[in-house]
Image: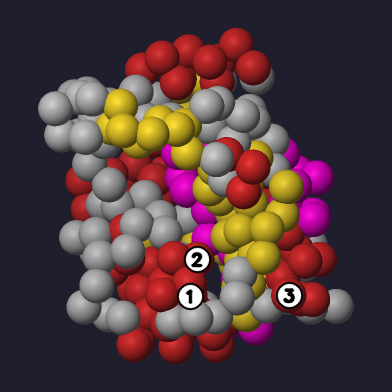
Amino acid sequence: MNKFSVIIPAGGTSSRYGNTNKLLEKIKDRTVIEETVSKFVDFDEITEIIIPANASITDELKALLTDSKIKIIEGGSTRQKSVCNALQVVKNDYLLIHDGARPLIRKDTIEYVLKAVVDKQAVSVMTKTTDTIKEVDSEGRIIRTIDRSKLYNTQTPQAFKTSIIKDAHEKLKDGNFTDDSSMLEYLGIPVYIVNGSYTNIKITIKSDLDFAKLYI
């Protein structure tokens, strides 16, 4: 059986959310980060969950997340640096990287990702774009309507053969990529899609948390 690691970056400051860290907000009886981690911890093939965390919430995370699979480490000043820190301690041949603020990820989606990454080496959960997309200039004037037939919305988890994503982070360590699949795209390495769910939202503003509470 292949073994997998999971990296869940928690190094952000929640600047767009407000004065509190969104990962510590409650969804019913659990915090956002507890709900997110709970989706991964019960998979036998997932043997470690590494959380590069913002120093301001490290103690709270250690108190909340006590499963033996979980390792909380120091995060970086950017998402890319946080993931890079976590990559230094990954033990398994395959890994998933998932946003700490996506607590609505479905377990069947995780199952699809675990299978797909072994076959494809690099995959990203995505959903097909359903809205009409417009390109707009700096003055707010619509320039054109973009063909949406080939457009997808990127979600997480993204998953990789560990050696491939480690190499990408080493080669692009001075960059500031906001997701890991884009690093492979930049290097010309193929990444394949796994169809996700439209409910797998990232909590960014307070209304997102309201949706998560209703959904759960």
> In what element is the residue under mark 2?
helix
Give the crowd class for mark 1: few <14, some 14-19, many >=20 residues within 10 Å. Answer: many
Query: Quick one: label 2 or label 3, which is nearer the N terminus?
Result: 3
Q: Earlier in the sequence, mark 3 or mark 1?
A: 3
Residue drawn at (65%, 19%) of the image: 216
Picture layout, residue 200 above or below residue 183: above
Q: Position of residue 118 (x, y in %)?
A: 76, 76
Type of amino acid at the residue the image marks with label 3: Lys
Residue 164 in the image: x percent, y percent? 54, 85
Q: Is residue 160 above or below residue 195?
A: below
Label ID, residue 181: 2
Q: Is residue 124 visible?
A: yes
Whole-angstrom CA distance, mark 2 to mark 3, is 13 Å
The residue tagged 3 is 120
Rendered image quadrant of residue 96: bottom right
Residue 98 counted in the magenta span: yes
**Which of the pair 136/206 is nearer the observer?**
136
The quadrant of the image that shows the N terminus is: bottom right
The numbered dot on residue 9 is none
- The reply to whether discs 1 and 2 touch (Cβ–Cβ < 8 Å) is yes
- Is there any visible trace of residue 152 in the rendered image? no
The segment highlighted magenta reads 91-112
SS state under label 1: helix
Q: Quick check: 68 left or right of 197? A: left
Left or right? Give the position of 70 relative to 121: left
Q: Are marks 2 and 3 in contact (CB under 8 Å)?
A: no
**Residue 134 location (% of width, % of height):** 40, 31
What type is the residue that disc 2 sits on?
Answer: Ser
Where 130 falls versus 108 (above or below)?
A: above
- The residue singled out by tag 1 in the image is 184
